[in-house]
Structure formats: C-alpha cells, structure tokens
Amino acid sequence: MDIINLPIFHITQISNLERIISRGELLSDARMNQENLDTHVIGDAEIKRRRLNEITTDCPPRRKVGEFVPFYYCPRSPMLYRINKGGTGLAEGCQSEIVHLVSKIGFVVQSGQTWVIADGNAGAYHTSFSNILDDIRELDWTAINSHYWSGVVHHKQAEFLVADTFSWRLITHIGCYDMAAKQRVDEILRQTGHIPKVIVKREWYY
C-alpha cells in the first residue's frame, strides 16, 4: 500500500466553497465556532456536539475530535447516504448540492501539520485513534472499499483527521454529482488562483 499517495475525501455543500476559497483553508468545527463563521452545515448536530465536547483522541495530541478537519478514505460515505435521505435535517435528495474535496495523505505529511488516524467513525465513543502513519495499513480496507456497507458502517467511515485547518491549495480535485453541479463549481473557482480539477463522478453518490 502506497500510503503517501492515498486519496482523502472531505464533503461539503457547494455553497461553502466561496468561504473556503476566501479563507484559503478548510476549518475545523471548533475553529468555525470560535470565529463565529457562517456555514451551511450538512452533518448531524448530535454527532458534531459529541465531537466538539466529549470525544478526545486517545493518542497525542489529546484533543477533541471537533478540533480537526475530517476526511474519509473513500467517496460515497454512509454519512452522505444519511444526509441525502434527510437524516441530518436537509432536504431528501440533497446530494447534488454536495461535493467531494480530494487531496492525499502525502500532502498533509509534507506540510508538517498534526494529524490523527481514526479506525472508524470519529464521532463514536468506541473509536480508536493513532498518530502512527503505518497504522493506516491496519484499517478495515475491505469495509472502506466496499460499495455496500451494511454491517461494516463504522469501519467504512474511518477518518484521517487534520488539526485545525487544511489549506485550500492542497485540494487537487473536486468531485461533483452532475454537470450542473460542475458548472456551478467552475463558476465559483473563477475567483481563485488555485483551481483544482473539477470532475463529474456520479459513482461517488447514491
């Protein structure tokens, strides 16, 4: 396994891209709360509360999970399914409004930023964490790579967590639901010097 070149995926609403670009970075939920920034939230409020207030990484640095920018190791996550089904308060069928921001682990390592590996959903109390890069090999890659994740949902949602912020310039690709979403993203990107490759990836959605 070539860990350095493993892709990582962060999902957000298209409407959040202008804020991300203007800041030049993605921010953790804790940082957004500290700065009282306006954002379109797509996640589950209760899970976010746990990540911000209750769940601490059990390896150095021992920080709340909500202090990290979260990435999955795959697109088409169980969380995206829940969001699209209206399970987090958004309209059912809203996945066309969501994009996958893609980078790779090597960029984070080279940047010198603090990161942590979660062996499953980092919003769950029973998740284990590690700061040893080679432990990525021990994740449940059968679950992560599975197209159908019934019974393995926790390990499918293993996360790569980057402390505090993640530079916009480390995003290499943006995966979109359809051509209409791609056109919207292309229009927003006209205002930035760093333009990731924008692609339609219908297979990354439900």
Image (cartoon, rainbow, N blue to C red):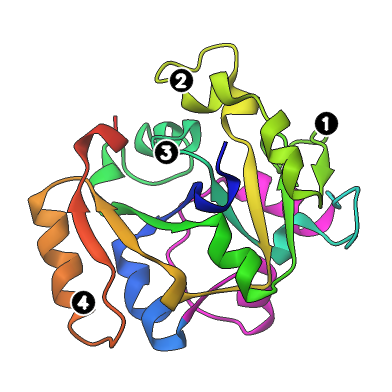
Q: What mark, if any, has residue 80 been given in the picture?
A: 3
Q: State how far apart marks 1 and 2 are (Cα).
A: 22 Å
Look at mark 1 in the image and give the residue it sits on: 126
Task: Confirm or deny contact between disc 4 and disc 2 (CB under 8 A).
Answer: no
Q: State how far apart marks 4 and 3 are (Cα).
A: 23 Å
| Image coords of residue 1 (percent x, y) | 57, 36
Task: Name the N-terminal-most of marks 4 and 2.
Answer: 2
Q: Residue furthest front?
A: 2
The residue carrying pointer 1 sits among few (fewer than 14), some (14 to 19) or many (20 or more) residues within 10 Å by Cα, namely few
Q: Which range of residues does the magenta coloring cover? A: 25-54
Label 2: state its secondary structure: loop
- Circle 4: residue type: Ile
Q: Residue at x 85, y 51 (%)?
A: 57
- Find out whether residue 71 is within the magenta segment: no
Look at mark 2 in the image and give the residue it sits on: 146
Look at mark 4 in the image and give the residue it sits on: 188
